[in-house]
Image (cartoon, helix red, strand yellow):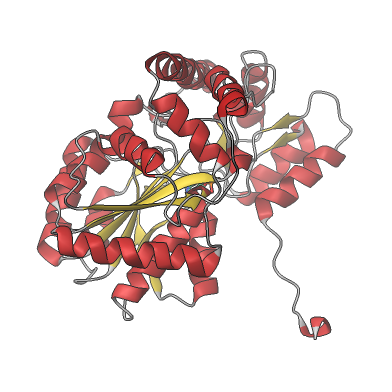
Amino acid sequence: MLANLKPQDPDKILMLIEEFKADTRQGKIDLGVGVYKDPQGVTPVMRAVKAAEQRIWDEQTTKAYTGLAGTPEYRAAMAEMVLKDVPADRLASVASVGGTGAIRQGLELARLANPDVTVHVSDPTWPNHLSIMKFMGLPFTQYRYFDNETRGVDFDGMKADIAKAGKGDIVLLHGCCHNPTGANLSMDQWTEVAEILEKSGAVPLIDLAYQGFGDGLQEDAAATRMLASRLPEVLIAASCSKNFGIYRERTGILMALGTDTAARDLAQGSMAFLNRQNFSFPPDHGARVVETILTDAELRADWAAELEEVRNTMLGLRTQLAGELRDLSGSDRFDFIANHRGMFSRLGATPEQVEALKADAAIYMVGDSRLNIAGLNKDTVPVLARAIVDAGI
Ligand code: PMP
């Protein structure tokens, strides 16, 4: 039986990690994989996470099963973090296996509710969005998003394309810090998106994987909150991997906002059912860490402060890189790097130029020229800037 299996395409980003590890050159720079790294190149355990884990270790008396939806306390704390004013009469939620699990369950929920659903997703997007939909056999189409000239959003293209989504279709949106481009909508543009969805009856599935990495915890949730308050139905897949730095704990949440309590209850039942079919109970440890932090004023303040340090470190690197490139290239064509938000920027380089950076300068980035800003520090920024200009980008 197993001999009948076909080889799967390897994940390009994971392949890049292996290639980087095998490179013996001194001073090599990894701008590939999407994890935050501090200036020493370490992905730290956040202080509040350590403290919460200690508390859980001291106080936890059982590892018995929780609920299929996860604990109510975790879900309430996450709903408050994401939505602030929580419309309890409309909100269904389940803890998930990371943000990826929330996206997968959100798509499954959409298909349960509408077997004819088509998903509209940005071009480009996080590659896993596409591979999950392909694997599920879910019809999807891509809307224009990135303008390779300005390295900003092609908003006219985006509007024209998402207007084609019909009633009951899903429009997959990155709530903030678009991956892989780093280019994001202004609040005015988000309002226009809301108007388009209001008109068509298409439902947004908001992928919120970087709340706190862009303009701040509140600012990064503003678009999600606006859509949640304006539209009758909204799905949200939020991840705690980045903003709590608990990547391997697999912590996330799927939220579904319906029109009334009856829709909420139907969604809640179906979402718990989907958890049951796919893995039964969601992982608890990371969720409990998050719940502990968010419900304790002192831990929450410390976590938010450390998250701000992370965010400001990345912003500082963006400003420095854009400045170095302005000086070296004698033009402002790289200023978009300072305007992008989140962990990533798409440089807009060709695959050949990306290869040249790897071959000539031992600088690794994803083939579509996505670079992870957090892979830099103030000493490597000038090295990257020089290599970019040398590669003729
Ligand atoms: N969405 C986007 C856009 C992402 O970049 C990621 C992480 N790379 C996720 C979702 C999911 O993250 P996780 O499953 O690790 O929580």
215, above or below 113, in the image: above
223, above or below 48, in the image: below
The quarter of the image holding the C terminus is top right
The residue that appears at 36% across and 44% down in the rendered structure is 72
Q: Pick out the residue farthest to the front.
A: 61
Of residue 269 and residue 64, the one placed in the foreground of this image is 64
Tell me, yes or no, if residue 142 can be seen here.
no
Percent across and percent down for residue 333 are: 43, 29
Percent across and percent down for residue 325 are: 53, 22
Of residue 135 and residue 261, the one placed in the foreground of this image is 261
Q: Pick out the residue farthest to the right.
A: 24
50, above or below 84, in the image: above
The residue that appears at 61% across and 13% down in the rendered structure is 378
Q: Is residue 207 left or right of residue 357?
A: left
The residue that appears at 65% across and 43% down in the rendered structure is 353
The quarter of the image holding the N terminus is bottom right
Of residue 209 and residue 16, the one placed in the foreground of this image is 209
Percent across and percent down for residue 258 are: 19, 58
Quarter where residue 160 is shown: bottom left
The residue that appears at 48% across and 59% down in the rendered structure is 129
Count of numbered labels shown in the rendering: 0
Percent across and percent down for residue 173 are: 34, 52
138, above or below 100, in the image: below
Q: Is residue 84 left or right of residue 311?
A: left
Tell me, yes or no, if residue 109 can be seen here.
yes
Q: Is residue 352 left or right of residue 144?
A: right
Q: Is residue 146 left or right of residue 90?
A: right
